[in-house]
Image: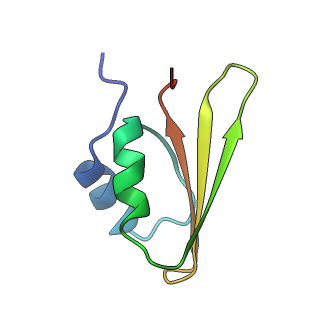
């Protein structure tokens, strides 16, 4: 089963549609690519009880908050 979404697919579905907040499963390496898309960005890493890393992006340029659920990091 496919548990990850490619960065291009994620951008097409969520960025281009200008969806304010979405939670998706991304490859941890894709998170770094997302960070590089913006200059003015704030990143928060929250670790949940089940050890999942939630990366919260607040993008002032697009005036939206993007929440990325990365796969479990080792």
Q: Could you tell me which residue is drawn at 51 percent across and 26 percent down?
A: 73
- Apparent side of residue 62 relative to residue 21 in the rendered image (left or right): left
Quarter location, residue 3 = top left
Residue 25 position (above or below residue 38):
above
Displayed quadrant of residue 2? top left
**Residue 55, x across and y down, in percent:** 58, 48
Q: Nearer the viewer, residue 65 or 17?
A: 65
Residue 28 position, x and y percent, is 41, 37
Residue at the image position 39 percent from the left and 58 percent from the top: 34
**On screen, 31 above or below 48?**
below
For residue 4, side relative to residue 63 (left or right): left
Q: Where is residue 54 in the image (x, y as percent from the top left)?
A: 61, 41
Residue, far right? 49
Residue furthest bottom in the image = 61
Q: Position of residue 4 (x, y in %)?
A: 35, 31
Q: Residue at x 55, y 66 (%)?
A: 20
Q: In this view, does 32 lie above or below 37?
A: above
Of all residues, the one furthest to the top in this rendering is: 1
Quarter of the image that includes the N terminus: top left
Left-right relation of 62 to 33: right
Query: Which residue is the extreme one toward the front?
Result: 74
Up-down relation of residue 43 to residue 51 (above or below): below
């Amino acid at each position: 089963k496919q548990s990850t979404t490619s960065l291009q697919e994620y951008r097409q579905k969520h960025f281009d549609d200008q969806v304010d907040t979405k939670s998706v499963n991304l490859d941890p390496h894709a998170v770094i690519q997302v960070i590089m898309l913006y200059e003015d960005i704030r990143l928060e890493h929250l670790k949940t009880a089940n050890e999942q890393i939630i990366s919260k992006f607040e993008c002032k340029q697009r005036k939206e908050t993007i929440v990325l659920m990365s796969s479990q990091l080792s």
